[in-house]
Amino acid sequence: MSAASVEQPFHDEEPVTLTTIADEIMERHPGYRVEIIGGHLLVAPSPDAPHARALTGLMIPFIAAGLHDGETEVLQNVGLWLPTGAEDYAIPDLAVVDADIDDHFVENNAYDPVCFRLVLEVTSGNWKDDLKTKVGAYAEAKVPVHVIVDRKHQRLHVLTNPVGSAYENHRPHAPGELVTLPDSIGAKVTLDVAEILKAGQPKTAD
């Protein structure tokens, strides 16, 4: 999801929290996504059709593998509470979570990262946040598997083994490759890189 940093406005009255500002932005701009990472607001407009199309296509192999039944669920746009700041949370485009996620609610519609097995982002305008800022945040949260559909550079990134603010294993995959994700997500899922990246591009008239 694309994002742009937003500075906290100055208020003469009582202190206003970042969470309050985030809520005000979402109220004034329905459809916008607001996240707080490292004490900074990231604001993203509604995704374009190719972004949504790629995301829908990605859900299919996860659901076909049985990850939306029983012990896990496949969810879009569910908040993940981050350990990087007192108000920090992110909203991954897609996540594979434990089925008992409702028992791990923290606040502000975000859930404890302990129940997230995989998070996935599809890049948009500000792709640098997805390739750097969010990577560090998800590593700090110890999310075991992080996948990035990099529409800017036409690559699929798979990151595993979070240590500190980075992932020890980070492999980019190019079109033509088939990528099998770690078994730790709960089932065998293989992604066709070319198919995913094609779905994320605007359709052209024949």
Image (tube, rainbow, N blue to C red):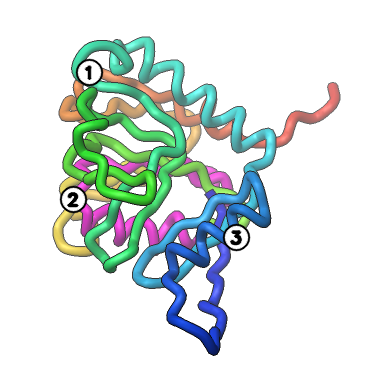
The kind of residue on which mark 3 rests is Ile
Q: Name the residue under label 2.
A: 142
In primary-sequence order, the first of circles 1 and 3 is 3
Q: Quadrant of residue 73?
A: top left
The kind of residue on which mark 1 rests is Ala
Q: Name the residue under label 3.
A: 25
In space, the residues marked 1 and 3 are separated at their CA atoms by 38 Å
Which quadrant of the figure contains the C terminus?
top right
Pick the residue in front: 76 or 123. 76
Which residue sits furthest bottom? 12
In primary-sequence order, the first of circles 2 and 3 is 3
Mark 1: few/some/many CA within 10 Å (<14, 14-19, 20+): some
Please tell me whether mark 2 or mark 3 is closer to you in this view: 3
On the question of residue 173 being in view, the answer is no
User: Left or right: where does residue 79 sit relative to residue 165?
Assistant: right
Magenta span of residues: 128-155
Residue 199 pos. (x, y %) = 60, 28
Confirm or deny contact between disc 2 and disc 3 (CB under 8 A): no
Q: Mark 1 points at which residue?
A: 187
Where disc 1 sits, the SS reads loop
Please tell me whether mark 1 or mark 3 is closer to you in this view: 3
Instruction: Check residue 71 for magenta coloring.
Output: no
